[in-house]
Image (cartoon, rainbow, N blue to C red):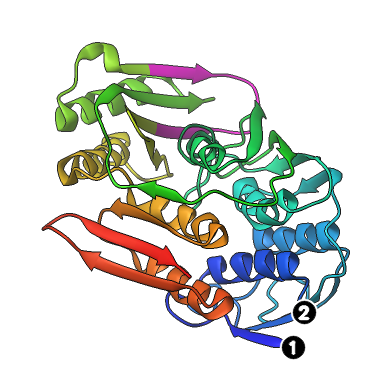
Amino acid sequence: MLTIDGSVGEGGGQILRTTLSLSLIAQTPVRITSIRKGRARPGLMRQHLTSVQAAAAVGRAEVTGAAIGSQEIVFRPTAIVPGAHTFRVGSAGSTMLVLQTVLPALLRAPGPSSLTLEGGTHNPMAPPFDFLELAYLPLLRRMGTEVAATLVSPGFYPAGGGVARVEIAPAPALAPLELLERGEIRGRRVVATVSNLPRHVAMRELDAAAAVLGWAPECFRPSVLTGGHGPGNVVTIAVESEHVTEVFTGFGEKGVLAETVATKVAEEARDYLAAGVPVGEHLADQLLLPIALAGRGAIRTVRPSSHTTTHLDLLRNLLGIRASVEQISERAWHIEIGR
């Protein structure tokens, strides 16, 4: 049985999710120890436990240690089971991270799958639904997949309560992805969404983002939602280019000024544009696994995060891939993966 140390590198949940994904694909049992040891609250949180449970359902797996706070699990898959699955996080925990865990295996399944995901759809420290829809899935489709996602209702941090549906067709092999140029910029937009909060919060965020970005007024718009589960606030910036759409997100938090939320995410988008690369920090991390499963590929991105370098090390360990990270200019890095 393969044993993976969950404390290496940045010691977060990505080690758990990628290990489960590859265990399902290879149908190989694994033991994962020191899960999320690098976090302030180590062990399995609700969204991580749901990821384990989802992987167990998809893989007809026997699992030991699957409990809140557990820092070690043993996972023994026996199959990849397509079909209709419903996974409930039961909190504002990220449904998108649950999807990330099982999607690679379901692409290898013998039939199509339909997932219903209940919980958080727009969470700090996780890819929100807009990122999945606009940035990630179009690139997966470029690699030969047929995956469609629908947001039934949003679930904002901290209340959750959202629902997303995902339809997945089998794609036994992925085509390599090379994403080295952004191409012409075709569209820019900033949307400040407030759910059960005053409209002026969104307007203040738009003003703050405009002060950083300097884009035309028509690029900025508020979105005011009522009803649903609890208050929520998210600022979403999308940059649509010829070869890729990048998405940047800031989340409102109690005690944090609206202007601070918007300024921070606007600065991230501004720095991405200044770097002249196609791939931002978070998209780079998300693309590593599908590129590794395709066997080869290359991207140009901003400075890789510790999350990304940890993920690369894990893929080297589990798949035996070659991976290089090279700084090619003051603000640009080249990541290449091959057998």
Q: What amino acid is labelled 2 in the image? A: Pro
Question: Is residue 39 something that shows in the picture?
Answer: no
Q: Position of residue 60 (x, y in %)?
A: 88, 64
The image quadrant that residue 334 belongs to is bottom left
Q: Position of residue 66 (x, y in %)?
A: 78, 72
The residue at which mark 2 appears reads as 29
In the picture, the disc for residue 147 is none
Figure check: 132 above or below 43: above
Callout 2: SS: loop
In magenta, the rendered stretch is 222-235
**Residue count near mark 1 (Cα–Cα under 10 Å), binned few <14, some 14–19, many ≥20:** few
**Residue count near mark 2 (Cα–Cα under 10 Å), binned few <14, some 14–19, many ≥20:** many
Asked if residue 229 lies in the magenta stretch, the reply is yes
Question: Is residue 259 something that shows in the picture?
Answer: yes
Residue at 32% x, 40% y: name it: 261
Q: Is residue 63 left or right of residue 313?
A: right
Q: Position of residue 214 (x, y in %)?
A: 14, 25
Residue at 62% x, 36% y: name it: 155
Asked if residue 264 lies in the magenta stretch, the reply is no
Residue at 65% x, 32% y: name it: 148
Q: Is residue 216 left or right of residue 188?
A: left
Residue sitting nearer the eye, 161 or 165: 165
The residue at which mark 1 appears reads as 1
Q: Position of residue 297 (x, y in %)?
A: 42, 56
View extreme (left): residue? 330
Callout 1: SS: loop
Residues at marks 2 and 1, CA–CA distance in whole angstroms: 6 Å
Label 2 with label 1: CB-CB less than 8 Å: yes
Q: What amino acid is labelled 1 in the image? A: Met
- Give the position of the N terminus as an image quadrant: bottom right
